[in-house]
Protein backbone atom coordinates (compact mmCIF):
# COMPACT_ATOMS: atom_id res chain seq x y z
CA UNK A 1 0.00 0.00 0.00
CA UNK A 2 1.43 3.34 -1.07
CA UNK A 3 1.97 5.75 1.72
CA UNK A 4 2.62 9.46 1.43
CA UNK A 5 3.20 11.08 4.79
CA UNK A 6 3.20 14.78 5.53
CA UNK A 7 4.94 15.86 8.68
CA UNK A 8 2.08 17.89 10.17
CA UNK A 9 -1.71 17.94 9.88
CA UNK A 10 -2.06 21.45 11.29
CA UNK A 11 0.42 24.33 11.57
CA UNK A 12 0.09 27.89 12.79
CA UNK A 13 2.92 30.26 11.89
CA UNK A 14 3.55 33.96 12.17
CA UNK A 15 3.95 36.32 9.24
CA UNK A 16 7.57 36.46 8.14
CA UNK A 17 8.56 33.07 9.53
CA UNK A 18 10.35 30.53 7.38
CA UNK A 19 8.16 27.43 7.17
CA UNK A 20 9.15 23.89 6.19
CA UNK A 21 6.58 21.33 5.07
CA UNK A 22 7.96 17.82 4.77
CA UNK A 23 6.67 14.95 2.65
CA UNK A 24 7.91 11.37 2.54
CA UNK A 25 6.76 8.54 0.27
CA UNK A 26 7.62 4.88 0.67
CA UNK A 27 6.99 3.50 -2.82
CA UNK A 28 10.15 4.56 -4.62
CA UNK A 29 8.18 6.95 -6.85
CA UNK A 30 10.16 9.22 -9.13
CA UNK A 31 7.58 12.02 -9.33
CA UNK A 32 6.61 14.18 -6.40
CA UNK A 33 4.34 17.22 -6.30
CA UNK A 34 3.25 20.00 -3.99
CA UNK A 35 -0.24 21.47 -4.41
CA UNK A 36 -2.26 23.95 -2.45
CA UNK A 37 -6.03 23.69 -2.25
CA UNK A 38 -8.31 26.65 -1.69
CA UNK A 39 -12.12 26.79 -1.82
CA UNK A 40 -13.41 27.45 -5.31
CA UNK A 41 -9.92 27.22 -6.83
CA UNK A 42 -9.24 23.52 -6.57
CA UNK A 43 -5.74 22.12 -6.38
CA UNK A 44 -3.03 24.33 -7.83
CA UNK A 45 0.46 23.03 -8.54
CA UNK A 46 3.27 24.85 -6.74
CA UNK A 47 6.34 22.76 -7.64
CA UNK A 48 7.10 19.27 -8.83
CA UNK A 49 10.12 17.04 -9.11
CA UNK A 50 10.94 14.11 -11.41
CA UNK A 51 14.14 13.06 -9.74
CA UNK A 52 16.53 13.72 -6.91
CA UNK A 53 17.84 17.30 -6.93
CA UNK A 54 15.52 18.12 -9.81
CA UNK A 55 12.66 20.62 -9.53
CA UNK A 56 10.27 22.39 -11.86
CA UNK A 57 8.00 25.33 -11.19
CA UNK A 58 4.31 24.72 -11.26
CA UNK A 59 1.60 27.29 -11.77
CA UNK A 60 2.03 29.30 -8.55
CA UNK A 61 5.68 29.04 -7.38
CA UNK A 62 6.03 32.60 -6.11
CA UNK A 63 6.91 32.73 -2.42
CA UNK A 64 7.84 29.04 -2.32
CA UNK A 65 10.90 26.90 -2.87
CA UNK A 66 11.48 23.16 -2.70
CA UNK A 67 14.20 20.69 -1.93
CA UNK A 68 14.63 17.08 -3.00
CA UNK A 69 17.88 15.71 -1.65
CA UNK A 70 16.61 12.12 -1.40
CA UNK A 71 14.22 10.28 -3.65
CA UNK A 72 11.66 9.64 -0.93
CA UNK A 73 11.54 13.16 0.50
CA UNK A 74 10.22 16.39 -1.02
CA UNK A 75 10.19 19.53 1.10
CA UNK A 76 8.23 22.72 0.51
CA UNK A 77 9.68 25.91 1.96
CA UNK A 78 7.86 29.17 2.52
CA UNK A 79 10.71 31.64 2.63
CA UNK A 80 8.76 34.34 4.48
CA UNK A 81 5.24 33.27 5.33
CA UNK A 82 2.41 35.63 4.49
CA UNK A 83 -1.29 35.52 5.34
CA UNK A 84 -2.21 34.77 1.72
CA UNK A 85 -0.32 31.51 2.06
CA UNK A 86 -2.89 30.25 4.55
CA UNK A 87 -4.17 27.13 2.81
CA UNK A 88 -4.33 23.35 2.69
CA UNK A 89 -1.07 21.95 1.28
CA UNK A 90 -1.10 18.54 -0.35
CA UNK A 91 1.90 16.47 -1.33
CA UNK A 92 1.58 13.73 -3.94
CA UNK A 93 3.76 11.13 -5.61
CA UNK A 94 3.45 8.98 -8.71
CA UNK A 95 5.57 6.43 -10.53
CA UNK A 96 7.32 7.47 -13.71
CA UNK A 97 6.73 4.17 -15.49
CA UNK A 98 3.19 4.37 -16.93
CA UNK A 99 3.37 8.11 -17.43
CA UNK A 100 0.12 8.70 -19.24
CA UNK A 101 -1.93 6.73 -16.76
CA UNK A 102 0.04 7.33 -13.63
CA UNK A 103 -2.15 7.58 -10.55
CA UNK A 104 -1.07 10.19 -8.05
CA UNK A 105 -1.12 9.27 -4.36
CA UNK A 106 -1.69 12.05 -1.89
CA UNK A 107 -0.66 12.70 1.66
CA UNK A 108 -3.27 13.63 4.22
CA UNK A 109 -2.59 17.34 3.82
CA UNK A 110 -1.24 20.10 6.04
CA UNK A 111 -3.56 22.91 6.97
CA UNK A 112 -1.34 25.94 7.39
CA UNK A 113 -2.57 29.12 9.04
CA UNK A 114 -0.37 32.21 8.88
CA UNK A 115 -1.28 34.87 11.45
CA UNK B 1 -10.09 30.72 -18.65
CA UNK B 2 -9.35 27.85 -16.28
CA UNK B 3 -7.61 24.83 -17.77
CA UNK B 4 -10.19 22.46 -16.30
CA UNK B 5 -13.71 23.67 -15.53
CA UNK B 6 -16.42 21.95 -13.55
CA UNK B 7 -19.83 22.91 -12.24
CA UNK B 8 -19.19 23.34 -8.50
CA UNK B 9 -22.69 22.16 -7.53
CA UNK B 10 -23.74 21.11 -5.00
CA UNK B 11 -25.80 18.39 -6.56
CA UNK B 12 -28.36 17.24 -4.01
CA UNK B 13 -29.90 13.90 -5.01
CA UNK B 14 -31.94 11.19 -3.29
CA UNK B 15 -30.57 7.70 -2.78
CA UNK B 16 -31.01 5.60 -5.88
CA UNK B 17 -30.86 8.53 -8.28
CA UNK B 18 -28.64 8.77 -11.34
CA UNK B 19 -26.44 11.84 -11.47
CA UNK B 20 -24.01 13.11 -14.10
CA UNK B 21 -21.09 15.50 -13.82
CA UNK B 22 -19.42 17.27 -16.68
CA UNK B 23 -15.99 18.76 -17.12
CA UNK B 24 -14.32 20.70 -19.93
CA UNK B 25 -10.60 21.20 -20.52
CA UNK B 26 -8.79 23.80 -22.57
CA UNK B 27 -5.53 22.08 -23.55
CA UNK B 28 -6.18 20.09 -26.72
CA UNK B 29 -2.84 18.30 -26.25
CA UNK B 30 -4.01 16.68 -23.02
CA UNK B 31 -3.32 12.96 -22.99
CA UNK B 32 -4.70 11.48 -19.80
CA UNK B 33 -7.94 11.99 -17.96
CA UNK B 34 -9.10 10.99 -14.51
CA UNK B 35 -11.82 11.38 -11.96
CA UNK B 36 -10.67 11.70 -8.35
CA UNK B 37 -12.87 11.63 -5.30
CA UNK B 38 -12.25 13.75 -2.21
CA UNK B 39 -14.13 13.17 1.02
CA UNK B 40 -14.56 16.02 3.48
CA UNK B 41 -11.22 16.87 5.14
CA UNK B 42 -9.48 14.03 3.35
CA UNK B 43 -6.97 13.77 0.54
CA UNK B 44 -8.05 13.15 -3.08
CA UNK B 45 -8.03 9.54 -4.26
CA UNK B 46 -8.27 8.14 -7.75
CA UNK B 47 -11.80 7.04 -8.62
CA UNK B 48 -11.18 6.00 -12.20
CA UNK B 49 -9.16 6.77 -15.28
CA UNK B 50 -11.07 7.84 -18.38
CA UNK B 51 -10.31 6.04 -21.61
CA UNK B 52 -11.08 7.24 -25.13
CA UNK B 53 -13.65 4.52 -25.66
CA UNK B 54 -15.38 5.24 -22.37
CA UNK B 55 -15.24 2.89 -19.42
CA UNK B 56 -17.38 1.57 -16.63
CA UNK B 57 -16.60 0.49 -13.09
CA UNK B 58 -19.65 -0.85 -11.33
CA UNK B 59 -22.11 2.03 -10.91
CA UNK B 60 -19.67 4.54 -12.39
CA UNK B 61 -19.31 5.33 -16.09
CA UNK B 62 -16.80 7.77 -17.53
CA UNK B 63 -16.88 9.20 -21.04
CA UNK B 64 -14.38 11.28 -23.01
CA UNK B 65 -15.12 13.44 -26.02
CA UNK B 66 -11.80 14.71 -27.41
CA UNK B 67 -13.40 16.75 -30.19
CA UNK B 68 -15.41 18.79 -27.68
CA UNK B 69 -12.74 18.52 -24.96
CA UNK B 70 -15.32 17.23 -22.57
CA UNK B 71 -15.31 14.53 -19.88
CA UNK B 72 -18.28 13.14 -17.99
CA UNK B 73 -18.94 10.93 -14.99
CA UNK B 74 -22.24 9.13 -14.51
CA UNK B 75 -23.18 7.60 -11.17
CA UNK B 76 -26.12 5.20 -11.12
CA UNK B 77 -28.10 4.09 -8.07
CA UNK B 78 -26.49 6.70 -5.83
CA UNK B 79 -25.55 5.68 -2.30
CA UNK B 80 -25.18 7.85 0.79
CA UNK B 81 -21.49 6.94 0.73
CA UNK B 82 -21.11 8.57 -2.69
CA UNK B 83 -21.38 11.98 -1.03
CA UNK B 84 -18.06 13.67 -1.75
CA UNK B 85 -16.36 16.17 -4.04
CA UNK B 86 -15.53 14.81 -7.48
CA UNK B 87 -12.45 16.25 -9.13
CA UNK B 88 -11.88 16.18 -12.88
CA UNK B 89 -8.17 15.81 -13.62
CA UNK B 90 -6.29 16.20 -16.88
CA UNK B 91 -2.68 15.49 -17.73
CA UNK B 92 -0.72 16.77 -20.70
CA UNK B 93 1.54 13.74 -20.72
CA UNK B 94 5.33 13.77 -21.01
CA UNK B 95 5.47 16.79 -23.30
CA UNK B 96 3.89 18.93 -20.61
CA UNK B 97 5.84 17.40 -17.78
CA UNK B 98 3.09 14.94 -16.94
CA UNK B 99 1.51 17.54 -14.69
CA UNK B 100 -1.91 16.77 -13.34
CA UNK B 101 -4.27 19.74 -13.63
CA UNK B 102 -7.26 19.62 -11.31
CA UNK B 103 -10.68 21.12 -11.67
CA UNK B 104 -12.14 22.84 -8.62
CA UNK B 105 -14.49 19.93 -8.03
CA UNK B 106 -18.20 19.16 -8.01
CA UNK B 107 -19.91 18.55 -4.69
CA UNK B 108 -22.36 15.65 -4.51
CA UNK B 109 -24.72 15.17 -1.59
CA UNK B 110 -26.83 12.03 -1.55
CA UNK B 111 -29.74 12.14 0.87
CA UNK B 112 -31.95 9.38 2.24
Image (cartoon, helix red, strand yellow):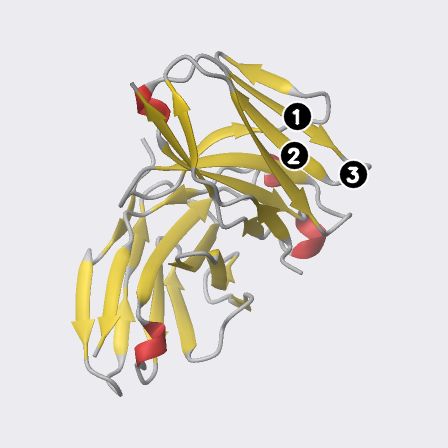
Q: Residue at x 42, y 80 (%)?
A: A63
Counting from the top left corner in percent of width and height, residue A27 is at 37, 40
Label 3 sits on a secondary structure element that is loop
Q: Residue at x 41, y 17 (%)?
A: B78
Could you tell me if the residues under marks 2 and 1 are in contact, i.e. CB atoms within 8 Å? yes
Q: The disc numbered 1 marks a residue on which chain?
A: B
In the displayed structure, B23 sits above or below B83; it is below
Q: CA distance from mark 3 to mark 1?
A: 12 Å
Picture disc at residue A45: none
Label 1 sits on residue: B63
- In the rendered image, residues at marks 3 and 1 fall on the same chain: yes
Q: CA distance from mark 3 to mark 2?
A: 9 Å
Picture disc at residue B71: 2
Q: Quadrant of residue B70?
A: top right
In the displayed structure, B35 sits above or below A71; it is above
Label 3 sits on residue: B68
Q: Residue at x 32, y 37 (%)?
A: B39
Amino acid sequence: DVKVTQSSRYLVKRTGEKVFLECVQDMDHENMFWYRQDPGLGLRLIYFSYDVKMKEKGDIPEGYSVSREKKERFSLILESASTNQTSMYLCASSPRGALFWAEAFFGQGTRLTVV
Amino acid sequence: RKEVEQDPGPFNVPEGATVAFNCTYSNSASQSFFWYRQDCRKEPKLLMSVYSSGNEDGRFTAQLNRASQYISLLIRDSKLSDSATYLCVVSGGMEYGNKLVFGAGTILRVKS
